[in-house]
Amino acid sequence: GFIQCAGSRTPDHLSYCSGTCCMDSLKQAAYVREQNSDAKAHIIYRDIRTPGLYEEFYRNMQDDPGVFMTQGDVVGVVENDDKSIAVEVDNTIFGEPVTMEMDLVVLAVGQVPSVLNGESALNLEYHQGPDLPELKYGYPDSHFICFPYETRRTGIYAVGSVRQPMDINDAKLDATGAALKAIQAMELTDKGKTVHPRAGDLTFPEFNLSRCTSCKRCTEECPFGVLEEDDKGMPLPSPARCRSCGICMGSCPVQIISFKDSSPNIFKEMMTSYEMPDEFEEKPRVLVFACENDALPVFDMAAINRLKINTSVRILPMRCLGGLNLVYINDALSSGYDGIMLMGCSFGDDYQCHFVKGSELANTRLGKVQETINRLNLEPERVRQFAITMNDYEKLPKIIDDFVEELEDFGPNPFKGM
């Protein structure tokens, strides 16, 4: 007998599906039947998952008179006096518990990365540690939608079951995709350019170390381990690892990090260059910090579809929302902006940030803005973060209109015109 999902898809052990177990058990049952036509194979399952063309194999096994499939939950496995095994199954389609006698029971357990057993996958000389940053299940962390093979260590790719549970055919496709990405990375790095998602960028962060306080925030918050530390705790950049996301720029409390085309001074000049309505016009002015990977394209899609965007907003594009420095919020509010919208990718377990931690870090920093807002005697709701995906372009006008309506209830920023 084969027991599916043994410890999988349950919060008590593995909450995920390993993807291959159903096909593995069906294949093993077929082997048993081929070698002994009198043998019987029982498959006890919660759900049978055989995607794509594997469905044909599943149907063939259903037609085999020696293969019995029972849907239900295994609640007990007991060894009898004659050494046979009794399997107790509940929640069956029969409406009552069933006990099956078997000579051998095979548990279809889930795939688990070896790193969970304490084994080290790599021995990297990174300040942030020798291994690849992992998800909570031990698989390497990456942007699973756009860059599935890429890990948070530039130039190192996770393939096949190292990346996530999969069968051999999928692993072959995985390896091909990763190899092509590796070739692209080597070619770009050889030319002194960044790899995806800002492929071909020639700008890298510059550090004014004479003002560095050795707070170590940049070395700790960089998602890609670009920054090492010297004996004094100052950052030592490794450009070949860098993806030019600007998250380090957002982390620095003294604003010593900048790019040639992006810096705290440039952002301040952009903020103050916009025309600001005076308080008597009763027209709010909203500043939007928009991530260039998801939020900015959503504005483009809304415009392409002729959707009307509230004219109160002014947009500042950012490499990543994680590049938001708290001084930008202070400068914007002090300049008279009535509200600030931070628009970036979704974060959390199902994150979609192209730079992995950018949106999450922006949200964490936003929690620290409260002190600044209170010091300015302003409502904290004037500054909010919004998780935006590419499918939200139809919702965008309402999201902005609702925010502007809230600001109108608060009244104008008292710093307007000062």
Image (cartoon, helix red, strand yellow):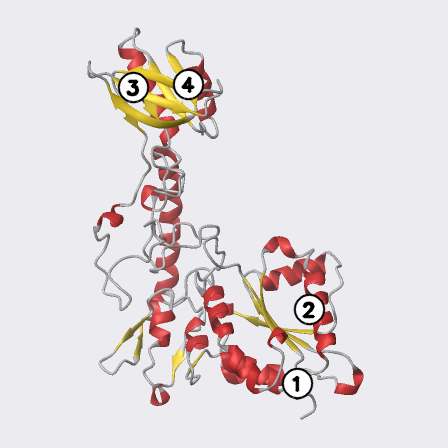
Q: Nearer the viewer, mark 3 or mark 4?
A: 3
Q: Which residue is mark 3?
A: 86
Q: Nearer the viewer, mark 1 or mark 2?
A: 2
- Which quarter of the picture shows residue 162? top left
Distance (Cα) linking label 3 and label 4: 16 Å
At x 35%, y 86%, the residue is 212
Q: Which residue is mark 4?
A: 69
Where's residue 405, x and y in %? 73, 70
Give the SS element for disc 3: strand
In the image, farthest residue toward the bottom: 418
Distance (Cα) linking label 1 and label 3: 75 Å
Check disc 1 and give the amino acid type.
Gly
Check disc 4 and give the amino acid type.
Met
- Which quarter of the picture shows residue 299? bottom right
Q: Which residue is mark 1?
A: 336
Do the numbered discs 3 and 4 sit on residues whose CB atoms are within 8 Å? no
Give the SS element for disc 1: loop
